[in-house]
C-alpha cells in the first residue's frame, strides 16, 4: 500500500506523507488522530472501518466542510465489516445523529424503512 501511495496524485486530499501516516494509523487506530491523518482519511472514509473505528467513519462522512462525503452513506448499510461489527456501527449515537442530519428517517417514514432500521413511535428510530 505504501508503494501505491507514492505513485498516485493525492494533492486534493493530502500529501504522500499524510497518507503514509494514515496507513500507519489504520494499523493501530488507538494512536492519536491528528489533522494530517484525518485529512488523508477523507480520501476514502471506509478505510477506517477496517481499523474497527466506525466512530471516526461517522465523523468523517458527517464533516460539513466535505459535502461529497454523503456519497459514503451507503457504507452505513454495508461497511465492509462482519455483521455484528456493522450492527455496532449502526447503533452508535453518531450514526443516528448523522442519519437525522441527512433526513433519512423522514424519507423512510414516507417510503418504508430499510431492514437495518425501524421506527420507534412517531418521532424516533433505531438502527440495528
Image (cartoon, helix red, strand yellow):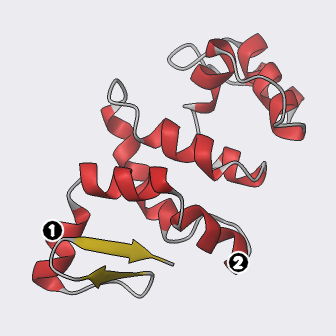
Which element carries disc 1, helix, strand or loop? helix
Q: In the visual, does 54 lie left or right of 115?
A: right
In the rendering, which numbered label is found on residue 114?
A: none
Q: Going 31% across and 74% down the picture, which residue do you hit?
A: 125
Which element carries disc 2, helix, strand or loop? helix
Using a 10 Å C-alpha cutoff, classify the residue at mark 1 as few (fewer than 14 neighbours), some (14 to 19) or many (20 or more).
Answer: some
In the rendering, which numbered label is found on residue 106?
A: 1
Q: In the visual, does 94 lie left or right of 57?
A: left
Earlier-in-chain disc, 2 versus 1: 2
Which residue is outermost to the left?
110
Q: Mark 2 points at which residue?
A: 84
Q: In the visual, does 31 lie left or right of 103?
A: right
Residue 14 x %, y %: 61, 16
- State the separation of the CA atoms marked 2 and 1: 26 Å
Vertical placement of residue 95 versus 24, above or below: below
The quadrant of the image that shows the N terminus is top right
Amino acid at each position: 500500500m505504501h508503494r501505491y501511495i507514492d505513485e498516485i496524485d493525492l494533492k486534493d486530499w493530502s500529501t504522500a506523507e499524510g497518507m503514509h501516516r494514515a496507513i500507519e494509523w489504520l494499523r493501530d487506530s488507538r494512536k492519536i488522530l491528528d489533522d494530517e491523518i484525518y485529512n488523508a482519511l477523507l480520501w476514502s472514509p471506509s478505510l477506517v472501518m477496517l481499523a474497527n473505528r466506525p466512530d471516526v467513519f461517522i465523523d468523517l462522512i458527517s464533516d460539513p466542510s466535505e459535502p461529497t462525503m454523503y456519497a459514503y452513506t451507503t457504507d452505513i448499510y454495508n461497511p465492509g465489516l462482519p455483521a455484528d461489527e456493522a450492527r455496532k456501527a449502526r447503533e452508535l449515537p453518531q450514526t443516528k445523529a448523522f442519519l437525522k442530519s441527512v433526513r433519512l428517517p423522514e424519507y423512510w417514514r414516507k417510503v418504508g424503512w430499510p431492514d437495518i432500521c425501524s421506527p420507534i413511535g412517531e418521532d424516533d428510530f433505531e438502527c440495528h
